[in-house]
Image: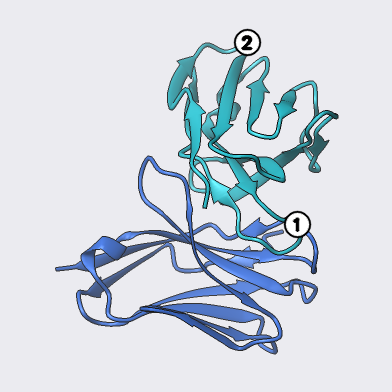
Amino acid sequence: DQQVKQNSPSLSVQEGRISILNCDYTNSMFDYFLWYKKYPAEGPTFLISISSIKDKNEDGRFTVFLNKSAKHLSLHIVPSQPGDSAVYFCAASPSSGTYKYIFGTGTRLKVLA
Amino acid sequence: SAVISQKPSRDICQRGTSLTIQCQVDSQVTMMFWYRQQPGQSLTLIATANQGSEATYESGFVIDKFPISRPNLTFSTLTVSNMSPEDSSIYLCSVTRGTGHNEQFFGPGTRLTVL
């Protein structure tokens, strides 16, 4: 049973436009969420996180939105750049004080120049 | 952040053999983890490498198949034992400096192919 789902395996966006990557979860005990970016032949790199007490967190071009009632989070990248082309994973943590993260299957973003 | 290296970066192995993967961090870290990413799948936590004691394994993973060592706060190894083609995956180590909610930093991964 996949507790963290990224239903779009791939996404293509024109450079300069907004990229929106979505993630759904099923476990209401998740209270901390993260997004990672992964380039080929490299390990995942932490991008941004959000606690369940917030509904939005922003860091430069990256913003994560959390809708707890819908058990849905999204990552917005504005403006998108060709260097953003990578696989993006969302991850969720079951409860405060734990290291255990459950990862989604990833969305491959391609930003077209 | 932390600088993490893994050796080997990739390997092709015969079934029935074993491979040990090394993970080295540039500074002391609180926790070290080993993940597996099978083709087209998400990252799955194999175990937490505990310094000076036995690793803590997740459901579906056992010590006999994936023995782990962590002799100090900067180094760990994962062995994939008696390999079969189903073990073909990317194996990643990760670290975190604190406890609780902290981002994990990942190594570059080891791509293993078992023939």
- Can I make out residue B66 in this image? no
Secondary structure type for disc 2 = loop
Q: CA distance from mark 2 to mark 1?
A: 37 Å
What's the chain of the residue with tag 1?
B
Figure quadrant of residue B85: top right
Find residue A59 and name its label. none
What amino acid is found at the position of numbered circle 2 in the picture?
Gly
User: At x 73% / y 74%, what residue is drawn?
Assistant: A31
User: At x 30% / y 64%, what residue is drawn?
Assistant: A84
Which of the two discs, 2 and 1, labels the residue nearer the N terminus? Answer: 2
Residue at the farthest left position: A113
User: At x 43% / y 27%, what residue is drawn?
Assistant: B9
As drawn, the chain in blue is A
Q: Is residue B10 left or right of residue A23?
A: left
Q: Is residue B61 above or below residue A13?
A: above
What amino acid is found at the position of numbered circle 1 in the picture?
Thr
**In this rendering, which labeled residue sits more in front, label 2 or label 1?**
1
Q: Give the x, y percent position of residue B44.
A: 64, 46
As drawn, the chain in cyan is B
Residue at the farthest right position: B53
The residue wearing badge 2 is B16
Figure quadrant of residue A110: bottom left
Residue at the farthest front position: B27
Q: Is residue A26 left or right of residue A37?
A: right
The residue wearing badge 1 is B99
Number of marks in the image?
2
Q: Give the x, y percent position of residue A111.
A: 24, 67
Specify whether disc 2 shares its chain with disc 1.
yes
- Can I make out residue B90 in this image? yes
